[in-house]
Amino acid sequence: MARTAGSHSDITGPRIQSAALKLFARHGYAAVSMRQIAAEVGVQAGALYNYTPDKQSLLFGLMRDHMEELLATWRSRSCASGALARLEDFTRFHISFHLGRPEEVFIAYMELRNLSPENFSVIEGLRRDYEDALEGILRDGVTAGSFEVPDPKIATLAVIAMLTGVNTWYRAAGRLSLEEVETIYWDMVRKAVAAV
């Protein structure tokens, strides 16, 4: 199938991803059709298939790109020393990274059920890599006697859920700055793991 006149793969491809991200976050994956995505981009529905095999591939690509960017950004940071400093760094990083990506976060958590089994397995693996980073910090803190955590895996999931929740209510124009929110959440995380 020929590309629509005036379209460019380096422009149209990202526009398709952006439109899918916006529509999936607003209406949910199941409620969005390829026709709606095409209309949002301003191309004919058939033209989408020059850029993606299907809607599932769009969803998977958005989730994979988000997780890969998250992991790459986390891994590129210089490591603080000591479990307590590393935990604070993780807390602040998680909040600041995700606040600028509300649609990606919504899709990453709410649309997992719509992934095919093979795509789910890939995303689950990437999520596990990120969770393992925090779990490693907690385990190191327990070993060093800095934290008292009966089950580091459960604590990991609880901390990530708490930190991700900031996306649901934080507004830059609100009464607290991002730094103030990070500090309050850091204090809650520190107390939750019983850092001494």
Image (cartoon, helix red, strand yellow):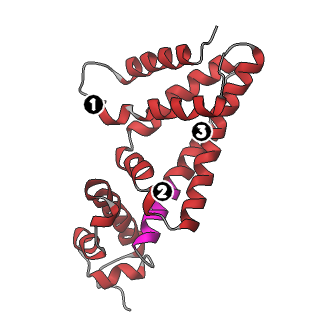
Identify the residue shown where x is 34% and y is 63%.
29
Q: Quadrant of the N terminus?
A: bottom left
Answer whether residue 66 is visible to the viewer in this image: yes
Identify the residue shown where x is 44% and y is 76%.
52
* Disc 3: which residue: 74
Residue 74: give x, y in percent of width and height: 59, 39
Hey, what amino acid is under mark 2?
Met
Q: Disc 1 vs disc 2: which is toward the camera?
A: 2
* Disc 2: which residue: 63
Identify the secondary structure beneath mark 2.
helix
* Disc 1: which residue: 171
Quadrant of the rendered image containing residue 167: top left
Hey, what amino acid is under mark 3?
Trp
Hey, what amino acid is under mark 1?
Arg
Q: Is residue 58 magenta?
A: yes
Q: Does 59 appear above or below 106?
A: below
